[in-house]
Image: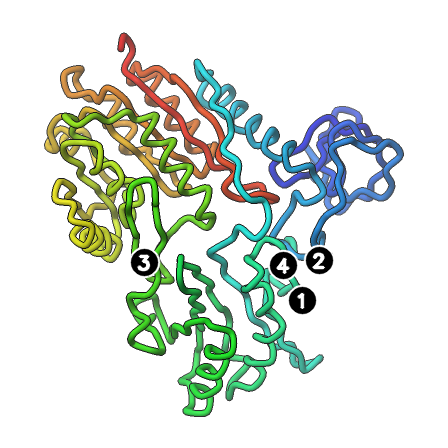
Amino acid sequence: MLEVESLDLEARGVARRDGKVIFIEGALTGELVSAHTLRRKPSYEIARVEEVFRESNLRVKPKCRHFGVCGGCVMQHVDAGAQVAIKQRALEDGLTHIAGVRPQRILPPLHGPTWGYRFRARLAVRWVAKKNKILVGFHERKSSFVADIESCEILPPHVARLLIPLRGLIGRLSAPDRVPQIEVAIGDRATALVLRHLLPLTPADIAELRGFADQYDIQWWLQSKGPDTVHALVPEHEAALAYTLPEFGLRMPFRPTDFTQVNHQINRALVSRALGLLQAGPGDRVADLFCGLGNFTLPLATQAREVIGVEGSQSLVDRATQSAAEAGIGNASFQTLNLFDVNLQWLEGLGKFDRILIDPPREGAHAISQALAQLPSDLRPGRIVYVSCNPGTLSRDAAILVHEGNYVLRAAGVINMFPHTGHVESIAVFEPDGV
């Protein structure tokens, strides 16, 4: 028998046997279990729980009947509050062990809906010839196979109800084995499905798509090759997708393949918190790095004197520029630049910023952190807010800012953007020492 000491971010119980770490799928902290070894390595083993002799009070019944097979979620058997605590500990452990720092203040976690929250998703499609069956859904856990699911609790109900009808639709197309995926993007007034098709669609295929769209009130977008080939089946739908930030009176248009946050309610709370922590005033000049389509830039422009957004994707910069113009915002400007390849001279060339917001992808903001660490004191921003989707790269960059740049980590906390998954979204606040 094994006693589980903790959980990792894949919701595996962590136990030890003769000093060797055992990661146990399906086991929770404090439980006494037996387990079957799936993989054995010199320094660790991966196992699956066989029997629970002492059950944790954190264990709950998964809501989804496909849990354990479908790879969309790994934590449905863990109490929702405990999931957030696990992610908070992962953030704190990363900052302590990787960065060697502790935040002066732990921010209360941001909570939101735990079901039906996923407004973006990539659904895999597979025609199983031996069974003459179409599968539409997420991949199985740790597998390239598509899970045979008929429902999904983290998708909004109106999209989850499409899983079975989509099987029938794909089966009626001329080349069902040449449709590898369907991307879902939901706006405030429209739901778009992007059909990836490897062969040209026939007139009969188009008629099937139009009939499906009318029946289920969705929009079809088509993608024959790369992202630049994506277009709406009905041209009038090209400008239909948008999400809102009511606190700032903003409507943010986007295309279905643009990066947007999957959880709209949490995104609103995140924008509000980030701006509250940044504390930009009417006389401040602010930089928003990795600005995307202006999710933070445009709200910041309602508070600051000037905001400059920098982003690597020209299409997102174009979208942000257009949104600013439509909203009548004249104090926000945008630049296209690879932010993974910048240096001190580039940052100095932009001039003095009173506040800087950083929202990088999983790779983090290594080059920017190094440039900020090297800035002379008279050019240093009074506050930096770093929004992260990877506690490992946040911790790496925090180490640079604190130990090389003499910044202080004032506060940090988690945002539960992806309930029931191991994904950790977080936010951290830095100030120059002495501020």
Q: Amino acid at mark 2?
A: His
Q: Are marks 2 and 3 in contact (CB under 8 Å)?
A: no
Q: Are marks 2 and 4 in contact (CB under 8 Å)?
A: yes
Task: Find residue 24 and report its horizontal and vertical position in percent.
Answer: 74, 39
Q: Are marks 3 and 1 in contact (CB under 8 Å)?
A: no
Helix or strand or loop: what does disc 1 sit on?
loop
Q: Is residue 402 above or below residue 50?
A: above
Q: CA distance from mark 2 to mark 1?
A: 8 Å
Q: Are marks 2 and 1 in contact (CB under 8 Å)?
A: yes
In the depicted view, which residue is nearer to us: 282 or 123? 282
Tell me the tag on residue 150: 1
Instruction: Pick whichever of labels 3 and 1 is earlier in the sequence.
Output: 1
Q: Residue under circle 2?
A: 66
The reply to whether residue 376 is visible in this rendering is yes
Task: Find residue 387 and report its horizontal and vertical position in percent.
Answer: 38, 34
Tell me the tag on residue 254: 3
Helix or strand or loop: what does disc 2 sit on?
loop
Q: Residue under circle 4?
A: 152
Q: Is residue 414 above or below residue 124?
A: above
In the depicted view, which residue is nearer to us: 276 or 395? 276
Instruction: Pick whichever of labels 2 and 3 is earlier in the sequence.
Output: 2
